[in-house]
Amino acid sequence: MRRCPSPLALLGASAALLVPMGCQGTIGSNSWTPPDTEYRSGEVDFVCDEAATETPSVMRRLSRTQLQHTVQDTVRRLLPEAEAGALLASIEGDLGAIPQDLRAESDVQEGQKLFFRADTTVGEAAVSAHHRLSSALGAALAQPAALDAMGSTCATDEDPANDAACVDELVDRVGRLTHRRPLDDAERAFYRDEVYDGGDALDLAALQDLFVVLFAQPNFLFHIEGTGALTPYEAAARLSYHFWDTMPDEELFAEAESGHLLTADGWQAQVERVLGDERARQSLQVFVEEWLRFDQLNPASTGSGADFDHIAGDLGLDASFDDAVRAEPVDLLLHTLRTGGTFRDFFLSEVSTTQDPRLAAIYGVEPAAEGETVLLPPERKGMLSRVGLLLARADVALPNINSITHPILRGVFVRRQITCDYLPAAPGGAMDNLPIVDRSETGSREATEILTGSSACNNCHGRINPTGYALERFGPIGQYRDSEPLFDAEGAVTAELTIDDSATMTEADGSIAGAAALAETLYESEKVGACFARHYLRFALARAEDPAQDGCLLAELDEAIDADRPLSEVLSAVVLAPSFRVRAAN
């Protein structure tokens, strides 16, 4: 019985293809000295050193999302819609079995994580999953019905005279997609003469082996690039994977083939087209959800207890509500792009895009019509009052949601993810011998002050706590409230406390009050824009930023935000920079 090659054999054989390309680098993380506390504090302007050398790049594999999208798009490029849908349904389990990516700790900011696309680890589970996936693809595409649907009737017409040309055509057509560029002569000979062992005869089993190797070789699974200036096809792949999380489309391929892509006008035009395409939502959704740590969000639908039921009322919170919460910032970002808005317009937005009636009810407005917006009440101005930013994250909170708000947890989230403030780990023993606080008699602000009243806590909590206090008008699931209810063990309200949402902050001249003032104060401090620049550069480069070597890119992003240039220009700045089309060897 014919057997598919083992995973290690496939990777070993196809790795030979990397040698003539001059591909260099290792699979792993960059090594450099973390920046000083000044950079990590969120207080510093970025410094552009034109003489700085390019940060070395590691050889990255496709992220889980990118690999899934690439498989789907490759199949859809090979087969008509109905046949492609059927084939993809047959391998759904294999696509789903690709291991989840991991988020590494940032070297430059305690408590922050790099993006999933920065994960370069390749473990045994990933190798096995890739092998099963390539084997399933090879078996499915080598079926006579699939070959007919691909237009390769020469493979099934029982005419031996055209068999050799038929195999040649399949090698070129499938190889162009799995390598994301045309095969060179050495690669074509490798697949035709060494992988396909049917000679000049049409052999379905040999075709299956060919397809398996094409989908298992490194050019399909990794971002393979040479050293120095990128080739047109490498640049096309970088652009499409950045904005679409998938392979280049036929227009990008055509631009690469003609060489027009690497001209100034050609690159500008394609950047604008790719960012403006509906497929950009895929990548922007990933960026926003990971930037805001939605992967660790405590879903409102998991709230429990009689006190929580009192808070939630008849909203009917379920998984679809959680989806709407996650979608809102993404939809607002896309709305800002469509309308030519700025990052300021996004972060200090006064409108809602949600069509979910429960989320709209929490905001006190009607659901927005598709593609439209609804004006929010004044106290909701800015992103910090949106439900998705008010809910706690599981990495800094208990996993359950009840009737209690947590100013510390909200403050930590804003200070880490939104302003990039340096928050060192709590000193040893900080959690020992904490005062006991009876929450049935004590409000959230008073409880926070009791727990962190020690002078030793002030270095961090002097920034954390006021940030959380300014958000106290919003309950645990984001409803605006005039008072804070206290509950007994049975969930009955025992008291209604006056809310104090005033806050004294280093970024403000005096005291502020409320989420809208907090958002405006932090934005005007320029910390928010600078922090967004860091997050976006990490996402774009799929690694931690180096403030010395990446200073020019960081400065350009930050200046574009401060100058209120359109958000589309901010998001395009990284890919329009000449360094985006260069790879420095590691």
Image (cartoon, helix red, strand yellow):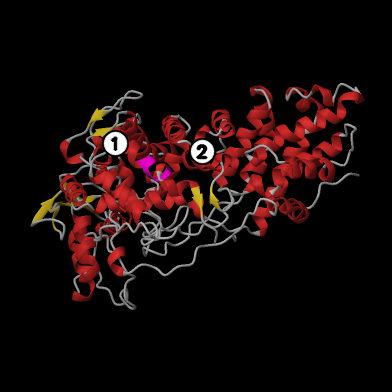
Badge number at residue 240: 2
Q: Amino acid at mark 1?
A: Pro
Please tell me whether mark 2 sits on a helix, a strand or a loop.
Answer: helix
Are the residues tagged 2 and 1 within 8 Å (C-beta)? Answer: no
* Front residue (pair 256, 73): 256
140 w.r.t. 471: above or below: above
Q: Is residue 497 visible?
A: yes
* Residue 485 at x, y percent in the picture: 20, 50
Quadrant containing the N terminus in the rendered view: top right
Q: Main secondary structure of the magenta part?
A: helix
Query: Looking at the picture, how far across and down is residue 576, in whole percent?
Result: 41, 42
- Compared across the picture, whether 386 is left or right of 485 comes to right
Q: Residue at x 32, y 72 (%)?
A: 426
Relative horizontal placement of residue 167, taking residue 418 as reference (left or right)? right
Q: Around disc 1, counting alpha carbons within 10 Å, would you say few (fewer than 14), some (14 to 19), or many (20 or more)?
A: some
Identify residue for label 1.
Answer: 566
Horizontal relation, residue 137 to residue 261: left or right: right
Cα–Cα gap, marks 2 and 1: 21 Å
**Which residue lies at the image location 32% right of the left edge and 47% below the top edge?**
557
What segment is highlighted magenta in the picture? Answer: 571-575
